[in-house]
Image: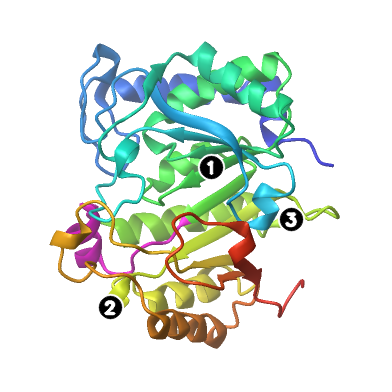
Amino acid sequence: MSHPAYLEACQNGYLDKIIAQLSKMLESCVICPRKCKINRLAQKKGFCKTGLKAKVYSFMPHHGEEPPISGEKGSGTIFFSNCNMGCVYCQNYEFSQLGEGREVDTHELAKIMLELQVMGCHNINLVTPTHVLPQILKALKIAIEQGLNIPLVYNTSGYELPQIIKLLDGIIDIYLTDMRYADENMSIKYSLAPGYPQYNQEAVKEMHRQVGLAKINAQGIIESGLIIRHLVLPNNISGTEKIMRFIKNELSEDTYVSLMSQYLPYYKAAESQGVERRLNEVEYEEAKKIMEKYNLANGWIQESLALERFAGVNIKPTLKKNA
C-alpha cells in the first residue's frame, strides 16, 4: 500500500507553506471562483455563509460512494455545511444551502479525521471542501502529527479555481469531482455559478495532471487518482455530450466516470422550469449511449433511477475495461 501524498508534504514543509498562503487569502477571500473579497478572518461572510471556522453537519463511515471509495469498511466522510454553489435542486439542502451543522475548530476537525481512521475507514472523504480548504489543511497538519495516514479524498462540486487546485499538488491523493454543466447559462440558472464550465474544465485538467488515472489496489480500493461524477439532469441541462467529449479529448478515455441517475427535484426544483421533474429512463439511456460513444468504459452506471442516496448496491461497472 502506498503512503498518502500529504505525509511528504508535511515533512518537507510544503503543507505549512500552503496553509499560510491559503489562510492569508481569507483576509479578502478569493479561494473560489466567486472571489467575494470579504474578510473571513474578521468573521465576515460571503456567498458561502462561512466565517473563520468550518461548520460540520455530520461524519461517518459512508458505504454509498463508488465501490473503490467505500470498499467494505466505508469511506470516512465529513459533510461540511454550506457551499459555494446555490443549486435549486440540492438534495443536501438542509446543510449545504440552509447551513445546518455546528462550527468546529481545527483541533476538533483533526480529531474527527483520526476517529474515522480508528473506525477502519479506507480514506478521509471531504465533502464540499472548497470554501473551508484553509481550515481543513490546518486540521490535516494536526492529524498527521497524531498519526493520520490514510488517503485524502477531495469530494467537490467542481466549482473551483484551477490556481487553488494547483496548490494542492502533493497534498490530495484522490479527486472525486463533479462535472455538472457544459453550458454557463445552465450553471447560472440552476446553480448560481457563473463561469462554471470554464473553471470546472481547467480545474479538472489540473486534477488529472496531479494524480492521473485512478489507481485501484488488489483489494479494489482506490489509493490515488481522479474519478469524475456526472449527474444527468432532465432535459439535457447538464450537457452530457460536451462533457464526455471533453473527458475523452482533454483527459483520457481511460478516466473513471460515474454516470449518476439519482436526480430528484429537491429543495426549490419544483419552482424551477426544466428541473421540476425526475430524470426518466430514456434520458439516462441516452446519457449511457453518449458515454459509450466516446469509449469511456471505466467507471460505473446506476441500475435504477431516482435513488435517494448514491448506494453502492445500485451501481455496476461499465464492464468494458479493467473489469
How far is disc 2 from disc 1 in space, using C-alphas?
Answer: 29 Å
Kind of residue indicated by mark 1: Tyr
Mark 1 or mark 3: whose residue is earlier in sequence:
1
Residue identifier under label 3: 215
Residue identifier under label 1: 154
Q: Give the range drawn in magenta.
A: 178-194
Q: In which quarter of the image is residue 8?
A: top right
Residue identifier under label 2: 235
Mark 2 or mark 1: whose residue is earlier in sequence:
1
Q: Is residue 193 magenta?
A: yes
Q: Vertically, is 297 above or below 4?
A: below
Q: Is mark 2 on a helix, strand or loop?
A: helix
**Residue drawn at 54 percent across, 51 percent down:** 176
How far is disc 2 from disc 3 in space, using C-alphas?
Answer: 34 Å
Q: Is residue 293 magenta?
A: no
The reply to whether residue 256 is visible in this rendering is no
Scheme of image coloration: rainbow
How far is disc 1 from disc 3 in space, using C-alphas?
Answer: 15 Å
Quarter of the figure that contains the N terminus: top right
